[in-house]
Amino acid sequence: MSASPVTEPATALLPAAGPASAADAFAFPGDAALRAAALAWQDELARERRLSANTVEAYARDLRQFLAHRAARHGTPGIPSLVALKPRDVRAFMAARRADGVGGRSLMRALAGLRSFARHIEREGHGTVAALGAVRSPKVERRLPRPIPIPAARAMTGLELRAGEDREPWILARDAAVLALLYGSGLRISEALGLLAKDAPGPGIDAVTVLGKGAKTRMVPVLPVVGAAVAAYVTACPYTLVPDGPLFLGAKGGPLSPRIIQYAVASMRGALGLPESATPHALRHSFATHLLARQGELRAIQELLGHASLSTTQLYTKIDATRLMEAFDAAHPRAGTAPARALASREKSRAPASVPALGPGA
């Protein structure tokens, strides 16, 4: 999931001065010049590239682990020793991490973090770490998103399912409005909660501008039913919504935390018989999957979701093809036979190219 831009320096991620053991856990192994470069890089990731705090922390952790690996084998690392790295040195680190049970996705992220730091020291005039470019990223099978069935998604965005809960009506209306934006407009939860009160969709407003990953803005359409849900929340909210303040407020009047929406969805899973994969973000997946099933055009869905790469959006075509295969296996009298499976496989491989244009029924 996307996070809000980081506004504090990355060094704020480090703990306050305290016991040596606590400080050492966040220290970068290496000489003074290398440690200074690593801290400057952290700050660059947060301030200039505006990565999320979690991403900055993960990259920094990966760099610390790599430097610790080097220190254990070759003594205190410095910038010149990094520039002189050989591909076998990087592969040895990756192999050691895999031996510790680290998965392919984490290894891919670690290599991305190391390459980011290498680009930083190159920009600072220290030279190129050529070894990192000579090592391939580990192959990782991309997980397919898990959409929520249409009836359940509709139920989660309404008020009837939670009518018996001991919650104030305006809070139930607020949660329904947030979830309606996730399912009806394909927003990330951070994008929905980042909306300002002055930008609230409502009657007569059929689009909203959201701030997505990388501080990029995009305009997404808002269905009348979604606008009505937001308008109902605004009318019921007991607090005064400041135009330049957050649209969605918590029970005490502060900005609404994503955890509250996550808890609300978790409480609905049992009633709907949904698995743990049914999260707020799964409603965004459902938006894309259901739109594609209704003949939505892939490029349009990419724009609506704010995906930088079409390959990310194409994952939803695989979901649609998988569902087609399951229906085939369940219903066709010759399901499972080699010729039939081969034909279905060819149809699946052509799925991305056969998506028809977006129509009014989408």
Image: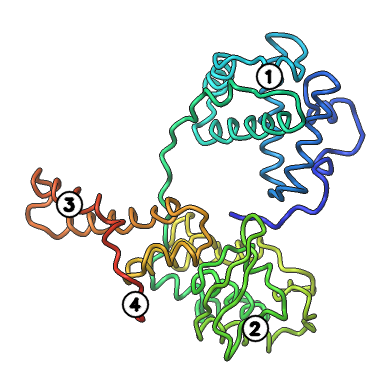
Instruction: Please tell me which residue lies in front, 126 or 256.
Output: 126
Residue position marked by numbered label 2 in the rendering: 233
Q: Nearer the viewer, mark 1 or mark 4?
A: 1
- Please name the residue that numbered disc 4 is placed on: 359
**Upstream in the sequence, badge 3 or badge 1?**
1
Amino acid tagged 3: Ala
- Residue at x-position 64% and y-position 23%: 129
Tag 3 or tag 4, which sits nearer the N-term?
A: 3
Color scheme of the displayed model: rainbow
Residue that carries the numbered disc 3 in the rendered image: 344
Q: Is residue 73 left or right of residue 325?
A: right
Q: Amino acid at mark 1?
A: Val
Q: Nearer the viewer, mark 3 or mark 1?
A: 1
Element carrying mark 2: helix
Q: Are marks 3 and 1 in contact (CB under 8 Å)?
A: no
Neighbours of disc 3 within 10 Å: few (<14), some (14-19), many (20+)? some
The crowd level at tag 1 (other Cα within 10 Å; few <14, some 14-19, many 20+) is: some
Of circles 4 and 3, which is in front?
4
Crowdedness near tag 2: few (<14), some (14–19) or many (≥20) residues, C-alpha within 10 Å: many
The correct choice, above or below, for 252 with respect to 96 in the image is below
| Residue 332 visible in the picture | yes
In the image, 56: left or right of 269?
Answer: right
Q: Is residue 15 above or below residue 215?
A: above
Q: CA distance from mark 1 to mark 4?
A: 54 Å
Three-letter amino acid code at the position of disc 4: Gly
State yes or no: discs 4 and 2 in contact (Cβ < 8 Å).
no
Nearer the observer: mark 2 or 1; the answer is 1
Which of disc 1 and disc 2 is earlier in sequence? 1
User: How far separated are the C-alphas under marks 4 and 3?
Assistant: 26 Å
Determine whether 354 is above or below 176 in the image. Answer: above
The Cα–Cα distance between marks 2 and 3, rounded to whole angstroms, is 47 Å
Residue with the mark numbered 1: 83
